[in-house]
Image (cartoon, rainbow, N blue to C red):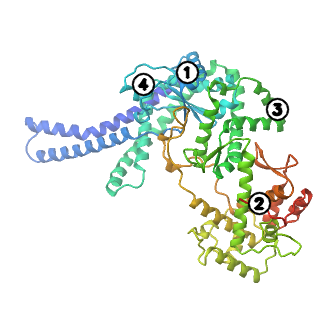
Amino acid sequence: MGVEVGAQAARSRALAVLRIRSRALAVALLPAAVAVVLLVGGSTGHISGGSWPVTSWIVTVIAALVLLAAAGIALVVARARPAVSPTVPIAEASAPDLYRLVRDLADRLDVPPPSAIALTPDCDSWLEDRTHPAHGPPPPEHRDEIAGARGVGGGRARRAPAAPVLVIGSPFLWWMRVGELRAVLAPVVAGTGPSAHPDIAAARRFVRGLDAAVAVTSEPARGPLARTVLAGVGWVTRLLLRSCRGHAAEMERGVAAAAAERAQAVDYGLRIVAQEQVGLAYAGWDRLLTRVALPAWRMGRWPARLDAGVVAALTELSRRDRLAEGFASRLGERPACDLLEEPGSVDEAASLLAARLFHGGPAEPGPDWAPVDWQEYPDEVVDRTWRTEAARLHRVLDALGVRHPTDPTQPDQGGPTLARVLDHLTAPATPATDDADLSVDRREAYGASGESGTGVSLNETEAGTEAGTGTEAEAEVEVGEDGEPVLGSERTAALAAGLSAELAREEAAAPAVASGPGGGAEQPGPDWSFWDDGMLPLFPLQPPRSGRELLADHVTAMVCCAAMDTAGAAPGLDWLDGPALLVDGVRAVDLGPRVLTLVEDGDPEPLRDWLRHLGVRPEKPVRLV
């Protein structure tokens, strides 16, 4: 009963959308109908004399212009390519068990099976309509749809099947068990039933065409005439889209309600348990991307087994959190990734797509964009990240004219030492002498006008603070436009600004992101042709780091380098927190607060106590990249 109610509501809303389309067509044809009546009446003598002949020609011209405009709008709507989610397509030959599971699920639900399966690097699943001719694949050598091949005609093969594509979140395949995945996909697959109704399918195509047309009319870099024409087209399509919005939303709610009601009879009890795993997988995936993958992406390396890393991260969470103790016992059951013939290559393709979406990395691996295994992560990512940031920190100190420690008892005074950083961040600034020296140093480092040697303005990276102006720099330290805690001194603020400028120069000098097809004929790869590279990254993980955050990260990196080179510490990987410093095989968890005390308060004593306890020698030079 609930299925019929939801489907009937969706159909009624779909008819409302189609009525709006019909009314728009009627409005476009109305002037032509009036012109035909006037012309026929004049030719038969029923309408003659006076101004009727002139009126007939005026109405005819208006009708021709309206028909021409309507034809142009219809052409734009028909040819505009609807947006498609970036995914990794999965051929049936590479996942026959997964296709069989989905086909059996569709049979149990008595709905048409999806036309194909694709993976997305996100914790979500949905049905996506790819029936537009622009989304049709080139003629393949073998068919990978669930329904199988229905013909071999080359001309017909380009049109996608009517059924939508099932998009599955790749973390689900690695974390969930087979039964849990089937339970989670049941309400999604059930949505193919209402989607197959002609009225609902037509209404969806109309709304998606309007949305794609609005995107076309919003594209920049066009000539004045084209912009004028597209502005009119955009106004009409936006008007139609606003008129359809409410009905389209209610139609989708009706489709979802009907699908959920139909899926009640399939693994209902297991689906309740599986929903807990959905939330857990989402938390682990978000943590893995922001804490583990992002540092590697910034270094030009992309972890090639992100989905496998989710399992390790959530297993670590179950070990730490007593509330998650029961989740680790599930690992003895068959994981859903066993439904794939080559889970490693699929994981690699999904990991590359994740780096592309969330960081804007290149489309293909290369010398500056190489994959990294989890075993190599500590040496290839953590160690390189710390030493690169420590080298950047000392370059900025050199640019600011910061001298090395003058203590004659300290050897190797000219090398990059931690003592130099500590002395600079804790040196007291006198009101007259130090401020003047600081202004001179900053002008020498970045130019008298606040410009760096490569054209990056220091003003842009200091949140509006003028270079060389002690009053405004002091205001930034005390207040801060971003609400961050105050820094320890003006020297600290200048160092943070210098790091921001140096990082901006490095990002500006980085080569442009390469665009091109990913994967290959032998293994699955993202379908790059469906979306624009200019929008990358589509989903940035974190906003740009503030000067305070940059300084704290760089000081932490310098401390870790000193600990590794002088106290025998080692880089490590924490699945939940990312890069970690291992001291005697144990993660050092109390370093961050001590660094913040130095940066924000200018107090080095907590950090010096920590260094003395571990036997770290700040006066010894460290190895940099």
Q: How far apart are marks 3 and 1 (CA)?
A: 38 Å
Nearer-N-terminus badge (4/1): 1
Nearer-N-terminus badge (2/3): 3
Q: In this view, does 316 lie to the left or right of 114?
A: right
| Residues at discs 1 and 2 in contact (Cβ within 8 Å) | no
Q: In terms of secondary structure, where does tag 3 sit?
A: helix
Q: Nearer the viewer, residue 11 or 410?
A: 410
Task: Indicate which label's residue lies in the foreground, 1 or 2.
Answer: 2
Nearer-N-terminus badge (3/1): 1
Residue in the image at 48% along x and 32% along y: 129
Residue at the disc numbered 1 = 3
Residue at the disc numbered 3 = 325
Above or below residue 352? Residue 417 is below
Indicate the amino acid at tag 4. Pro
How many marks the image carries: the answer is 4
Residue at the disc numbered 2 = 623
Image position, residue 409 (x, y; %): 89, 73
Q: In terms of secondary structure, where does tag 2 sit?
A: loop
| Residues at discs 2 and 3 in contact (Cβ within 8 Å) | no
Task: Indicate which label's residue lies in the foreground, 2 or 4.
Answer: 2
Nearer-N-terminus badge (1/2): 1
Q: Is residue 476 visible?
A: yes
Badge 1 density bin: few <14, some 14–19, many ≥20, Cα 10 Å: some
Residue at the disc numbered 4 = 198
Above or below residue 399? Residue 526 is above
Question: Residue 66: which numbered mark, if any?
Answer: none
| Residues at discs 3 and 1 in contact (Cβ within 8 Å) | no
| Residues at discs 3 and 4 in contact (Cβ within 8 Å) | no
